[in-house]
Image (cartoon, rainbow, N blue to C red):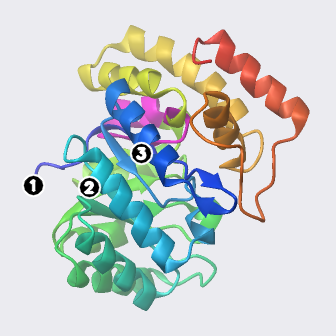
Amino acid sequence: MTPPFRGAFVAIVTPFNGDRVDFPALKKLVEWHVAQGTQGLVPCGTTGESATFSHDEQHQVIAEVVQACAGRIPVIAGAGSNSTREAVSLAQAAEKHGANGILTITPYYNKPTQEGLFQHFKAVREATRLPYVLYNVPGRTGVNLLPETTARVMALGNLAGVKESTGNCEQVQEMIDRGIPVICGDDHYTFPFMALGAIGVISVVGNFAPRIMRQLADACAAGNLGESRRLHAIVCELQRVTFSETNPIPVKAAVAALGFCREEYRLPMVAMTPGKKDALLAVMKKHGVL
């Protein structure tokens, strides 16, 4: 199966206004991403502060992003949980609301065994017809999805890829050797992972620098080493300030600086430290994204 999701996707922030989702701002943000060349959007991920959503809010955000995209670019809906029952329910709701795929994370906090991970994803696979992307981010979940387990999940069918956020080139190489589509989950690994054969990136930096991320993904896919190196250096500098504090604090500050949303978070996320925000804005200006 040819992987349906390639190139520069963005894990989109969720605008708030008075602790409620700001849907007009969200729609404007979607329109801007389409115009900027973003190749797909991922609402309700970590960057979207989905951990603070009610189920109704999650369903509404997915539905609004799908409607705003209007088939122009695909939508991979965040639909994961540390509860298998809840992950199944969220996946089914994402399908109902018209998403093109789902992003389903390894169960966090529980720290399941590899067999537990397989059974979790098997239940999600059996609950939806949508292509699904597994999300492996041990730094947030406390568990690493191993390539042999991923291969078992892939054998179930309809696996569109693995969003890999381990920073482990050896693990990425093993998955690619097994024929597993890999999608980079960390901006600064886009170039090395795509050089190994990854098919794209789900980006945080792309929230405020979508053209740069699209250009990097295109250069990597074309095998343009010189251009990939040049853009990689820029992305690494942007990534450093974007993760100077816990995601999504800096990236939402960056999107707010562009005028697309209020600099408003839900606890336990709080506003960015002033000095670090100044550094973020300075790097944005340096590279022409502000």
Q: Which mark is residue 27?
A: 3
The residue wearing badge 1 is 1
- Residue flagged by tag 3: what amino acid is it? Lys
Q: Quick check: 234 left or right of 193?
A: right
Between marks 3 and 2 in the image, the one whose residue lies nearer the viewer: 3
Q: Image point 76% across, 58% down: which residue?
A: 269
Q: Is mark 2 on a helix, strand or loop?
A: loop
Whole-Å distance between the Cαs marked 1 and 2? 11 Å
Q: Can residue 81 be seen in this view?
A: no
Q: Residue 88 carries which label?
A: none
Q: Is residue 161 visible?
A: yes
Residue 81, image x, y percentages: 49, 78
Residue 119, image x, y percentages: 35, 87
Query: Any magenta on residue 199?
Result: yes
The residue wearing badge 2 is 180
Number of other residues with Cα within 10 Å of mark 2, as a class: few under 14, some 14 to 19, many 20 or more? many
Q: Is residue 257 above or below residue 134?
A: above
Residue 241, image x, y percentages: 72, 31
Question: Closest to the observer: 4 or 50?
Answer: 50
Q: What stretch is highlighted in magenta?
A: 190-206
Of labels 1 and 2, earlier in sequence is 1
Q: Quick check: 248 left or right of 1?
A: right
Q: Quick check: 168 left or right of 193?
A: right
Question: Closest to the observer: 191 or 289?
Answer: 289
Residue 34, image x, y percentages: 32, 33
